[in-house]
Image (tube, rainbow, N blue to C red):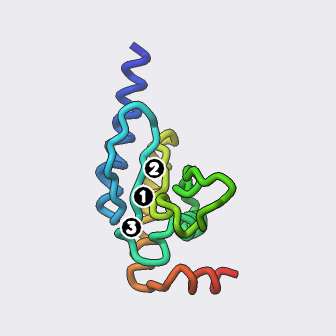
Amino acid sequence: RDTWALQRHFKMKRDFLLTELPKIGITVKWEPTATFYIWADLSALPAPINDCLCFLEECVKHNVICVPGVFFDINPREIRHLKQSKCINFVRFSYGPPMRNLTKGVEEMGKMISYWRKNQMTSSDYARTSM
């Protein structure tokens, strides 16, 4: 019984993110079935937040945490430059936190994305202004 209740609880939070993330411009191509993580595509977002590292930096300013996709890229001895990573436009979100945190996180990311739709710049320019 407890197992089913826990599964329903996590499914509700997963479904919330799967519904809300696309509304703010974040694409989810694969619906998770056995984890409590969502692999999300930022490529449709405006620069510089379509870069997972810039996205994380801006999220932190809004008290939101995600894991940049490049942290999951297999790149032994750093042969490829970070910007060449196949994961540069991806982040991983967890739907483990309480629902109120997920709701607030989506709300804050929506504000952040809205700001960057009006104030786009290249990742290089962003890096210079962030120093």
Residue with the mark numbered 2: 102
Mark 2 touching mark 1, by CB under 8 A? Answer: yes
Residue with the mark numbered 3: 43
Task: Tell me where residue 110 appears, x and y as whole percent.
Answer: 40, 66
User: Horizontally, is 34 left or right of 129 in the view?
Assistant: left
CA gap, disc 3 and disc 1: 17 Å
User: Horizontally, is 77 left or right of 100 in the view?
Assistant: right
CA gap, disc 2 and disc 1: 6 Å
Residue kind at label 2, given as amino acid type = Leu
Mark 3 touching mark 1, by CB under 8 A? Answer: no
The quarter holding residue 40 reads: bottom left
Task: Tell me where residue 118 appears, x and y as whole percent.
Answer: 40, 84
Task: Tell me where residue 25 appears, x and y as whole percent.
Answer: 33, 65
Residue with the mark numbered 1: 106
Mark 3, secondary structure of its residue = loop
Between 55 and 83, the one nearer to me in the picture: 83
Residue at screen point 69% across, 55% down: 77
- The crowd level at tag 1 (other Cα within 10 Å; few <14, some 14-19, many 20+) is some
The quadrant of the image that shows the C terminus is bottom right
Mark 1, secondary structure of its residue = helix
In the rendered view, would you say 62 is above or below 12?
Answer: below
